[in-house]
Image (tube, rainbow, N blue to C red):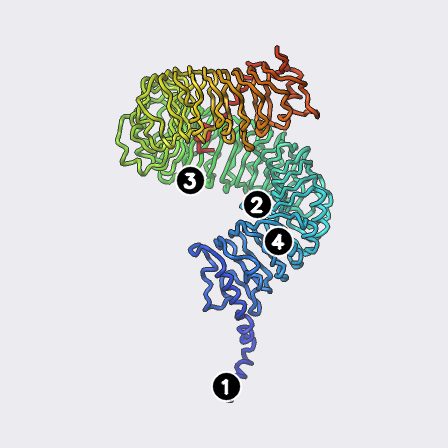
Amino acid sequence: MRISLFSSLFLMPLCSLFLGFCIYVVSDQCLGDQQSLLLQLKKSLQFDHPSSRKLVHWNPNDDCCFWAGVTCNEGRVIGLDLSSEWISGGRLDSSSSLFSLRYLEHLNLADNDFTGSEFPDRFLELKNLSYLNLSGVGFRGQIPIGISQLTKLVTLDLSDPLGISSANPLKIESPDLATLFQNLSALKELYLDGVDISAGGYEWCRALSSSLPNLSVLSMSRCKLSGPLDSSLLNLQSLSFIHLGGNNFSAPLPEFFADFQNLTSLSLPECELKGEFPQKILLVPTLQIADLSGNDELQGSLSEFPLNGSLRTLVLSGTGFSGRLPHSIGYLKMLSRVDLSYCSFSGPIPSTLTSLTQLVYWAMRHNNFTGPIPSFNMAKNLTEIHLAGNRLTGEITSNRWEELVNLKILDLNDNLLEGSIPSSLFSLPSLQYLFLGYNRFSGQVDEFFNISAFQFFQIDLSGNNLEGPIPMSLFDLPHLEYLSLSSNNFNGSFQLNLIFQLFRSLLILDLSANNLSIECSQTNFSLFSSVLPPITLRLAFSKLNSFPDCLRNQSNLLSLDLSNNHIQGEIPKWVWELPYLHYLNLSFNNLVNREQYLLNSSSLDVMDLRSNQLQGPLPAVTSNLLYMDLSRNNFSSIVPASISSNKLYGRIPGSICNATQLRFLDVSDNSISGSIPQCLIGMSETLYVLNLRRNNLTGTISDTFPSSCGLEVLALNGNQLEGELPKSLASCTILKILDIGNNCIEDSFPCYLEDMSWLGILILRFNKFYGPIGCPRKVQHELLSVYATQLLEKDNSGCHALLRDDNVLHLLLKEQSNWHKMLQATRRSVP
């Protein structure tokens, strides 16, 4: 199109006048090839359109330099930020248009999902990159050598912070760490968390210190690094941020860490650190964050802190730190987060803590602290206090808490606190979790008001000496999910019916072991059950004489504990018809019979009916059952399940192997005969406890233990089993107790068991073992080195035993009891 002379004469001075503006518009307008490449990239990616904040708004009719996430210079794309764009796949391989954006200096694809994709090798073409962030994208395989050609990199983040690719992580193997970073001398920030490096201390420390002289941020958590930590790291004097958690250094923490003059953050949790912690490290003037948690073999104490230290976060939980807290901890005016839980600290909590106004989180659970709880009223921003499991004494008066308007969690469980519970605690506007269980609180709990404003989710007042009626205002809390008032002296009548009518969010209610008169007449809950969540109800030790009839139509019961009452007669049929019931405990009652039923509930996985007077045939085993205890009853029938100390006879049916979720099987002390079903041995992949002691079992032990055997207890003592001990038993590497005593096993000493590092009890006595007890190489096994010299016996057939049978029985029962407690704990959903 031509331009007339007049027009040209007119436009020339106009552009001269606004020359700068004209040039700016032309130079920053997106170049056509750049826009085309971006649109190709968008087309090749799969992303969630409703969640996208950038890609979804890329409009081809708009200038691409103004698209969200895009930065340009002279019309060329130099920055691309597509982090958290809900990308879940598509093509990001050698054909991707991304690698044709050659002017890119800043590329951020973090927190998207390319899980299972190989790390593309074309990143080497983006030679202008100074910032590359591929954190959490899920790439797998070897990091390509091309990364070493990105010599302008200042920040490199290839981390997997959430462990998304833990099953198939990125690797630095060939090329190794030294080769990969040999040209990246400009690098200042390196994040490789979750990358499999698998290198020894000397190797990885020297590789970094020789290649990355300007490094200030080093984050290599969960990289399978080993120790010891090499002093060559001191060459990296710019280091301010060191995060190496989740590795296996198996060595002391060197004192030279105190020589990093710019150190601000030191995070070494769960690194298998050992020995004495150098106190100088916590005195580094610039240090703001120190996390040494989860190193249970790391010993140490806290020295005096200097005035106005920089420390903001101190986390020592799960270490061997001990001693008293120094009063100078009050000098750390910037301290906001402290976690000293599960250590061995003792003595009083310093009163100087009252001057720490920046505290947000304070945890000292399970130590040996004594004395009163100091006031935290000066810490207006405090949100959590965790002091459970100490020996704290005194009262908790109202004036210690009333200013904590932001407090969400107060955990004082398991202490020696006494006095009354101040009503002001229930009035804290932000409090959601209140745990005062197992102390010495007494008196009545007052009613409280303005219920609708409260935020409570969980309240635990169990294990105290509280008395009087239960305050009904508790049942008006609109968000309450967990309420435990067990093991107190609450009295008066209690209308259980009201619970299901008033609560709309309650998940767990525990009223066990009080002096309540529980009233529970039948009510039609069909109007409520459809809107109520599944509920756990515990009424153990509640002096009940019959089944609470109001539960008949409560179809949302998830867990029911009526143990240790005086309930007599039959187990009503409606109990077995509750559709969501997973846990049922009716043990230690006077039940003598049950209405006819078939145990065909697809939901019930734990049933405890022990110590009653039940008789007749046993229920069939369902495939969902994890644990069933019918011991100490009067059952008599062919055995269909795992019941000790009854009068069971006949063979173990193969149908028991249909219980594919079974974890614990105990049919000891009966009169069961026949052989052990081969499929039962095959179930040891998921079965943890198999106790067939003292029966009349014959035949051989099938040599079919699976390679992924998960057995922890195998007890076959007191039968008539013969043949050799199966060699596949060596696959049960986490076995703790192996008892095959008092049988007719004929074999040489099982040296192949020496690699069972968890094995603590081995019983071979009263069989037909022959030959030397030694093995070709010296066995360093714990059970031989600890028990043999003190408890080794020789029986009349030349076999050896490490413990007397009554001692073994005690330990076996203890191990089974631990499993029983664990299965009960799985029914709980509270901390």
Q: CA gap, disc 2 to disc 4?
A: 21 Å
* Amino acid carrying mark 1 in the image: Ile
How crowded is the residue under tag 2: few (<14 C-alpha within 10 Å), some, or many (20+)? some
At a point 56% along the width and 72% down the height, the residue shown is 27
Q: Is residue 377 above or below residue 725?
A: below
Q: Position of residue 501 (x, y in %)?
A: 30, 34
Residue receiving disc 3: 429
Q: CA gap, disc 2 to disc 3?
A: 47 Å
**Camera-nearest label, 1 or 2:** 2
Residue receiving disc 2: 168
Q: Earlier in the sequence, mark 2 or mark 3?
A: 2
Question: Which residue is situated farthest in the top direction here?
Answer: 796
At a point 38% along the width and 32% down the height, the residue shown is 603
At a point 33% along the width and 36% down the height, the residue shown is 532
* Amino acid carrying mark 4 in the image: Leu
Q: CA gap, disc 3 to disc 1?
A: 74 Å
* Amino acid carrying mark 2 in the image: Asn
- The numbered dot on residue 3 is 1
Give the left or right position of residue 469, taking residue 358 as reference: left
Q: Earlier in the sequence, mark 1 or mark 2?
A: 1
**Camera-nearest label, 2 or 4:** 2
Q: Position of residue 812 (x, y in %)?
A: 53, 20
How crowded is the residue under tag 3: few (<14 C-alpha within 10 Å), some, or many (20+)? some
Q: Is residue 442 visible?
A: no
Q: Secondary structure at mark 3?
A: loop
Q: Earlier in the sequence, mark 2 or mark 4?
A: 4
Q: Secondary structure at mark 4?
A: strand
Residue receiving disc 4: 156
* Amino acid carrying mark 3 in the image: Pro
- The numbered dot on residue 339 is none
